Amino acid sequence: MKQRVNRATETVWAGEKNYRAHGASQVPVVNSVAYDYEDLEHWYKVSTGEAEGHIYSRNTNPTVAAFEEKVAALEGAEAATSFATGMAAISGTFYTFLKPGDRVVSIKDSYGGTNRLFSDFLPHMNIEAVLCDTDDHEALEEEIGKGCRLVHLESPTNPTVKIIDIKRIAEAAHEAGALVVVDNTFATPILQNPLELGADLVIHSATKFLGGHADALGGVLCGNAELVGEVFHYREINGATLDPHAAYLLLRGMKTLDLRVRKQTENAGRLVEYLSGHPAVEDLFYPGLKTHPHHDIAAEQMRGYGAIFSFSLKGGQDAVRQVLPRLQFANRAANLGAVETTVGPANTTSHVESTEAELKALGIPSSLVRYSAGIEDHEDLIADMENALGILENQSYKREGTGDVLQERI
Ligand SMILES: *Cc1c(COP(=O)(O)O)cnc(C)c1O
């Protein structure tokens, strides 16, 4: 019987022992494209699934399988299958389950790439995506009630870290006979397990927190063996397979996932505490703030509020342009979830394709900055932020777009 252990132990041990070779204590990178058999009978048995083994690395590979097992264990899932990127996992899931005439219900704040699937590609197949206001649970339930094949959710969302009550929406979806897919990239399995909340499938961009070192792309899908098997079948034919080298980097990165996410979450909380009292800050979004509209849902369904928050400055874009380059301990980059702190304005990262009007409709301030806390010392991060914001002292700013001048000196 498999002994249930805690997540910190699973991050280190799950998926490892089954794939070691030659007595090594680490899973090897198996670069082999294909596999050799004693005789044709054995080959035939592996091909038909009667014997364990691998055929061709586009389909399965030992290093990749170890990575999948680790993620499945952490999500409490029966099975997992992996992909070259997070977007391959999301699109592969959609193309597996959706047929012409189907309807998808989702949210306006989905990851940018996911949104492009809804707007630019699914309509080619006569698949309609209805995107609701992210935190409008009634609107989501109403659209789901009209009938749909799939409900795609993200919580917390990018970049304004909105929260969806996964249990509540999953119930509505199941009543309508729909599959529930949750993109759990922001929360990570350390802080949230959507399958326990009623989701059927969980997706991660492993590129972000799972790998954690911003040096490998990957995606993964978890759920029951039947559903995951269907998506695996699509992926082995579609070909968006995870590379064994990337699988190794992700596997190694995941050994410290629990440590990293705990520290990153603590750092984000400390930074938010500091910024919430700062006179230069206009908006501050973090599910851990009591003023967050769905703080109570986050407290209920998450074990921590996450490493990501966002904020805007009273001085608008001008202020952001001055402050961000002065941060010494932050990459100005389009990714998140890495050991290094990463910052970026929403209008150059997740929403680079959105117009000013679209940002406004989404409730995203045009000068919003996403901050993904790394594992650095929190006092250094706060000092770094203090120093960067210092450039705004004794300045008054023209607010971009509106033309009114901020009178107060910040
Ligand atoms: C980055 C990201 C993706 C896409 O993942 P890639 O690995 O870049 O393809 C999907 N969802 C969320 C929430 C992300 O942050």
Image (cartoon, grey):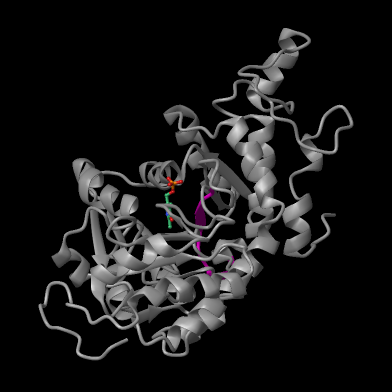
Q: Can residue 345 be seen at all in this image of the molecule?
A: yes
Q: Where is residue 275? Give x, y as percent.
A: 45, 82
Q: Nearer the viewer, residue 214 or 166?
A: 214
Q: Which residue is drawn at 44% across and 86% down?
A: 276
Q: Residue at x 79, y 62 (%)?
A: 4
Q: Which of 5 and 255 is in front in this view?
A: 255
Q: In which quarter of the image is the N terminus?
A: bottom right
Tell me: residue 95, above or below residue 338: above
Q: Which residue is drawn at 65% across and 61% down?
A: 260
Q: Can residue 297 be seen at all in this image of the molecule?
A: no
Tell me: residue 406, above or below residue 263: below
Q: Give the number of callouts.
A: 0
Q: Nearer the viewer, residue 393 or 250?
A: 393
Residue 205 among magenta residues: yes
Farthest top residue?
39
Residue 321 in which image quadrant: bottom left
Q: Where is residue 371? Give x, y as percent.
A: 44, 66
Farthest right residue?
23
Q: Which residue is drawn at 50% across and 30% down?
A: 236
Residue 36 in which image quadrant: top right
- Looking at the image, residue 52 sits to the left or right of residue 302; the answer is right
Farthest left residue?
403
Q: What stretch is highlighted in magenta?
A: 196-206
Residue 9 among magenta residues: no
Tell me: residue 52, above or below residue 10: above
Q: Where is residue 156? Give x, y as percent.
A: 44, 69
Farthest front residue?
394
Q: Where is residue 127? Give x, y as percent.
A: 24, 49
